[in-house]
Image: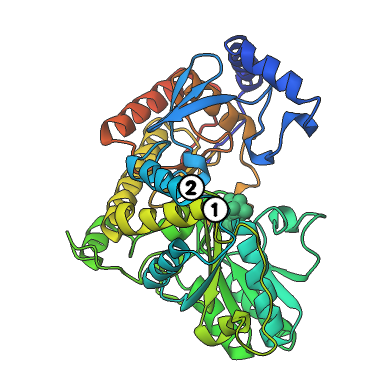
Amino acid sequence: MDTHHNAPLAFVLDEARARYAQARPRARDVHEAACHHLPGGNTRTVLYHGPFPLRAERGEGAYLFDTDGHRYLNLLGEYTAGLFGHSHPAIMAALTRAQAIGMNLGAHNLAEAELARLVTQRFRVMERVRFTNSGTEANLMAVATCRHVTGRDKVMVFDGGYHGGLLYFGGGGIPINAPYAYVVAPYNDTEGTRALIEAHRDDLACILVEPMLGSTGCIPAQPGFLAALREGASAIGAKLIFDEVMTSRFAAHGSAVDVGSAVGAGDDTPSEALGGGALAGVAPDMMTLGKWVGGGMSFGAYGGAADVMAIYDPSREGAMPHAGTFNNNIFSMTAGAVALRDIFTPHVAADLHARGERLRAAINAIFADRGIAMCASGVGSLINVHAVAGPVTTPRDLANSIDEAKELLFLDLLERGYYIARRGFIALSMVITDDEIDGFLEALSQVVDARRAALPHGRR
Ligand code: PLP
């Protein structure tokens, strides 16, 4: 491989940033004003990018409109929570119904019972489920549950794992993580992980893992890796938690043909084979959810075997309290039920999965045909573009990724009306049509052709 940094990259990136800034004077003003009240004008780190962040005014269907009159096809899909686009009619109707029911009921309501029925029916590992307000909270609760029921204290996580603002293990972990005793294992390194499980066999409470590393770049678990975690956890009496906050949208099996037959073409039978763990044929002890499962509202959920979750049964002597003013808020519960029951049926999930597989293959073909040392990884509708030739199977494979090349792509795509994450992440939403995907691929081809000299070269 003859990958090399191209001299013009820094130059063209400066020029692209300047063009971005010049075309968005209002966004700059709003940002400068916000900096007086929010640190760096920001309350959600992942959205920040220089020279100042894109400022959304509104969204409609698959499109985002910024404060300076630009329209973008939204391929970021709210980091997977925006599965239904910005204004899906069934979600809008659900929210209107919720409004009519009344906010802040402060009582058990009908919607939470229905959503729990639907969640446990689709994700069979969750015999019983509890709702939270975010994926972060769901993971914190799942870990706390496992530590309590095992009476052990250590928590195995993976380098590059992201489970929320207080559970981030990029570069080994951040100083503000929840203060548990972590054992940080190497993702997709089965032997290395086995050895660590063995070394901590007496005090490991749980293994918390994403079936595909999402935030660190859509790096799927290699065949056999999740099964080895299952085996290792069972052997030492630890619990296995799958964080499926992102991967719960995956349909059964890897290919379009298999997916279609797995859920029965034209048949919306609820399938336990949804989610990244199911994709690998491995069942965890506990599972966490978030994002789309709340229909686009604030949401999280954790669950597992009925006997484990029974510790939260308030009718029992010595029950563990689990609080949360908004756990059963009527908007999340109502929108989530509609999302699961009426919109994102297993068959729709299978279709989106297949469309994502095609999109990822087409992006890779654009890079490969032009000899550009970039690639796209992922599973189904979740894709990450990297500025390395690939393949990308562990976070270490991204050590030489050229961040500026991804920024250039991001800025150039914005200019052509396509919004992806600055880090190269794409979460295809179900409202994006095949024609719109073709338009995106055409725009990407144009960008790569125009910036050929500035992008890294080389073949696998
Ligand atoms: N777990 C995974 C795998 C995620 O990708 C995220 C969010 O991106 C979370 C947990 C945290 O969810 P939330 O942002 O709702 O707290």
Q: Quadrant of residue 434?
A: top left
Name above or below for residue 63 compared with residue 425. above
Whole-percent x, y for residue 302 in the image: 56, 69
Name above or below for residue 189 compared with residue 199. above
Quadrant of the displayed image that contains ligand 1:
bottom right
Residue at x 58%, y 38% (from the top left corner): 423
Whole-percent x, y for residue 31 in the image: 70, 22
**CB of mark 2 within 8 Å of CB of mark 1?**
yes
| Residue 161 visible, this angle | no
Task: Indicate the amino acid at tag 2.
Answer: Thr
Within 10 Å of disc 2 (Cα), the crowding (few <14, some 14-19, many 20+) is many
Within 10 Å of disc 1 (Cα), the crowding (few <14, some 14-19, many 20+) is many
Residue at x 77%, y 32% (from the top left corner): 38
Name above or below for residue 101 compared with residue 6. below
| Residue 346 visible, this angle | yes
Task: Indicate the amino acid at tag 1.
Answer: Gly
Whichever of callouts 2 and 1 sits on the residue coming sooner in the sequence is: 2
Label 2 CB-ligand 1 distance < 8 A: yes
Whole-percent x, y for residue 108 in the image: 53, 67
| SS for callout 1 | loop
**Mark whose residue sits in front, 2 or 1:** 2
Of residue 166 and residue 115, the one placed in the foreground of this image is 115
Residue marked by disc 2: 80
Q: Which of the numbered marks, if any, corresponds to residue 214?
A: 1
